C-alpha cells in the first residue's frame, strides 16, 4: 500500500535480481542468487548496500548474501540505468586465489578522476580484503591488500575527502584487532589513522561496521557497532590527521533509551547536524533514529516499532539520506502493513511517515525486505533494492527487485566534487543539460562547457562563495542538491 509515494517496480526494465545470474546494482558490486538468505531471521547476517547515484541516469551498487552461503560466484561490479539495461563490468576472484578481491559489501564511490573506488571484504594477497579502483570501462586495479596490521575485512565503502584522499574503516584488524580507520591515496598508499580499542575497556569504540562522512568542518564522522563507555557503540569524530574524539557512547542507562549498536553511518543534513540510526535500544527495543551535533549533543528523534505489529517498520539496517526537500528518507527491512519492510520519510524534527509498505502486491511482486538504502537520482525520484520478492526465482526463492519511488520532487544537479578552491574544475551532472546558458556558483557566474546532455564542466570563478550552484537550461533552472563549498 502506498501512503505518499508512487512505487514502480522495474521487472524487465530495471531488473529483478538474478535476471543475469546475479543480484543487481547501479555502479555496483554483487553476489549471486545462491548467496542470498531467504529467512527473515538471518537478516542480520545478510547485508545489502545502497544504490549510489553517480550521475545522470546511472546508479552503481553492490548486493550480496552472507559468506557462509557463498557458492561459485564472488561478486561483480555492474551498471544499471533507469531504463533497465544492465552491464557487468568486472567479476571478482578472476585471478588466482582471488588476488583481485572477493566479496564486497560496500558501494563503490566515484572519485573526482571519474574512476570508482571501493573495498572487498575478503581476497587480496593476504585474503583479508582489498581497496580497489575500477575504471568505468571495467579495468580493475587493486590498490591495497589488507594484512591485519593495516586492517582486515572492510565492510564499509570509502569517502573521498576534500584533500583528494579516500577514507574508510575495517571491521577488524589494526593493532588491537578491533578495527581501524584508514586513509588511502588514489595511487594506493595506505595509512592507519586510528586502531579501535586502543583505550582501556575499548572506550574509544570497537568494530566499525559503517563508513565515514566528511563534515563541513573538514572532520570525518562515523560510528562503531560496539565498545564505548557502556558497550553499546559510539559516535566519533576524527581529524584527517588521525586525532579521534568520542562524541557519544550509547546505552548509558538501563533500557538503552538513546539506542544501542549503531550499525549504519551518518548523514550530515543541510542544518549542519548529523543523523543516524541504531538497530537496538530505544523506547521499544527495536532501534532509534537520532540526531547529534558535531560537538556531541545527541537527541533521540524516533523509537522504532512504536505500535503493535510494527506498522511503522522495523530493523534500521541502512543509512538515511537527505533528499532535496530537506527531509530524511530511509527503509526498514521488515514490518509495515504486510511485514515486508517499508520506505519512510522523516522530518528533521522527528515526524515519521510511512510512504510505502512492501509485499502489497500478490506474491510480493513489488519486492520484500529492503535491506539496502536509498539514493535520489537527479530526476528527483528515489531508487532502492529489495532482497526478496519480485518475479524471478533463485533456487526456489525469489530474488529481489530494483524499484523507483516517485515522491513529487523536481530534478536537480549534483557536483563532483562538492567542494573546491577558486579555479577548481567541477563536473555538474544532471538531465537535459543541452543548451544550458549559464552556471552560477552562489550567484557568481562561472565559465562552463556542456560536455553532453548529462554533464557540464565548469570552473569555480574568482569571488565565488559557498552556496547553491544553479544551471539555467531551456527547460528551467536546476539547483544543486547540496551547497557547493568554496575552500580557502
Image (cartoon, rainbow, N blue to C red):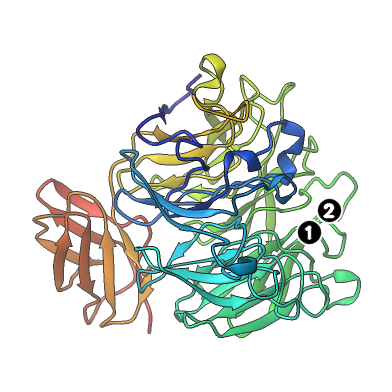
Q: Is residue 102 left or right of residue 460?
A: right
Label 1 crowding class (10 Å Cα cut-off): few <14, some 14-19, many 20+?
Answer: many
Front residue of 363/377: it is 363
Front residue of 61/407: it is 61
Earlier along the polypeptide chain: callout 1 or callout 2?
1
Q: Is residue 79 visible?
A: yes
Front residue of 131/56: it is 131
Rendered view: 175 above or below 169: below
Q: Quadrant of residue 446?
A: bottom left
Residue identifier under label 1: 233
At x 75%, y 58%, the residue is 225
Q: Position of residue 200 (x, y in %)?
A: 90, 76
At x 62%, y 36%, the residue is 332
Measure the C-alpha gap from mark 1 to mark 2. 8 Å
> Disc 1 vs disc 2: Cβ atoms closer than 8 Å?
yes
Judged from the image, the secondary structure of the residue bearing numbered disc 2 is: loop
Judged from the image, the secondary structure of the residue bearing numbered disc 1 is: loop
Mark identifier at residue 251: 2
Label 2 crowding class (10 Å Cα cut-off): few <14, some 14-19, many 20+?
Answer: many
Q: Is residue 61 left or right of residue 173?
A: left
Q: Position of residue 41 (x, y in %)?
A: 77, 34
Q: Position of residue 270 (x, y in %)?
A: 45, 58
Q: Is residue 215 visible?
A: no
* Position of the C terminus by quadrant: bottom left
Front residue of 476/61: it is 61
Amino acid at each position: 500500500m502506498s501512503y505518499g509515494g508512487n512505487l514502480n517496480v522495474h521487472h524487465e526494465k530495471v531488473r529483478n535480481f538474478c535476471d543475469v545470474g546475479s543480484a543487481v546494482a547501479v555502479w555496483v558490486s554483487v553476489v549471486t542468487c545462491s548467496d542470498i538468505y531467504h529467512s527473515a531471521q538471518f537478516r542480520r547476517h545478510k547485508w545489502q548496500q545502497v544504490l549510489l547515484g553517480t550521475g545522470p541516469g546511472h546508479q552503481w551498487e553492490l548486493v550480496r548474501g552472507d559468506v557462509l552461503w557463498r557458492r561459485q560466484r564472488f561478486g561483480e561490479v555492474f551498471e544499471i540505468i533507469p531504463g533497465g539495461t544492465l552491464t557487468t563490468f568486472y567479476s571478482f576472484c578472476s585471478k588466482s586465489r582471488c588476488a583481485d578481491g572477493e566479496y564486497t559489501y560496500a558501494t563503490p564511490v566515484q572519485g573526482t578522476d571519474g574512476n570508482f573506488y571501493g573495498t572487498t571484504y575478503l581476497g587480496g594477497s593476504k585474503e583479508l580484503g582489498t581497496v580497489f579502483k575500477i575504471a568505468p570501462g571495467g579495468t580493475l586495479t587493486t590498490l591495497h591488500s589488507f594484512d591485519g596490521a593495516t586492517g582486515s575485512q572492510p565492510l564499509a565503502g570509502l569517502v573521498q575527502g576534500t584533500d583528494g584522499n579516500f577514507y574508510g574503516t575495517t571491521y577488524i584488524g589494526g593493532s588491537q584487532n578491533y578495527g581501524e580507520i584508514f586513509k588511502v591515496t588514489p595511487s594506493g598508499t595506505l595509512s592507519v589513522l586510528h586502531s579501535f580499542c586502543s583505550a582501556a575497556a575499548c572506550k574509544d569504540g570497537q568494530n566499525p561496521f559503517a563508513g565515514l562522512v566528511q563534515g563541513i568542518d573538514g572532520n570525518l564522522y562515523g560510528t562503531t557497532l560496539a565498545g564505548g563507555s557502556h558497550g553499546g557503540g559510539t559516535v566519533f569524530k576524527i581529524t584527517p590527521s588521525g586525532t579521534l574524539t568520542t562524541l557519544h557512547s550509547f546505552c548509558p542507562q538501563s533500557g538503552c533509551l538513546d539506542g544501542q549498536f549503531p550499525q549504519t553511518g551518518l548523514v550530515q543534513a543541510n542544518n549542519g547536524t548529523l543523523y543516524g540510526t541504531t538497530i537496538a535500544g530505544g523506547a521499544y527495543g527495536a532501534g532509534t533514529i537520532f540526531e547529534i551535533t558535531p560537538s556531541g549533543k545527541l537527541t533521540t528523534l524516533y523509537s522504532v516499532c512504536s505500535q503493535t505489529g510494527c506498522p511503522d517498520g522495523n530493523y534500521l539496517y541502512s543509512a538515511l539520506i537527505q533528499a532535496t526537500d530537506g527531509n530524511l528518507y530511509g527503509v526498514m527491512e521488515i514490518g509495515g502493513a504486510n511485514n515486508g519492510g517499508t520506505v519512510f520519510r522523516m522530518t528533521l524534527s522527528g515526524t515519521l511517515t510511512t510512504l510505502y509498505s512492501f509485499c502489497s502486491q500478490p506474491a510480493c511482486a513489488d519486492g520484500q525486505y529492503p535491506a539496502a538504502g536509498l539514493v535520489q537520482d537527479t530526476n528527483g525520484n528515489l531508487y532502492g533494492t529489495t532482497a526478496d520478492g519480485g518475479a524471478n526465482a533463485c533456487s526456489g526463492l525469489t530474488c529481489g527487485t530494483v524499484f523507483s519511488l516517485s515522491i513529487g520532487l523536481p530534478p536537480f544537479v549534483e557536483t563532483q566534487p562538492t567542494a573546491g578552491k577558486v579555479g577548481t574544475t567541477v563536473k555538474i551532472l544532471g538531465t537535459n543539460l543541452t543548451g544550458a546558458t549559464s552556471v552560477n556558483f552562489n550567484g557568481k557566474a562561472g565559465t562552463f562547457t556542456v560536455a553532453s546532455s548529462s554533464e557540464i564542466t565548469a570552473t569555480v570563478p574568482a569571488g565565488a562563495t559557498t552556496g547553491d550552484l544553479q544551471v539555467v537550461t531551456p527547460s528551467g533552472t536546476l539547483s544543486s542538491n547540496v551547497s557547493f563549498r568554496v575552500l580557502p
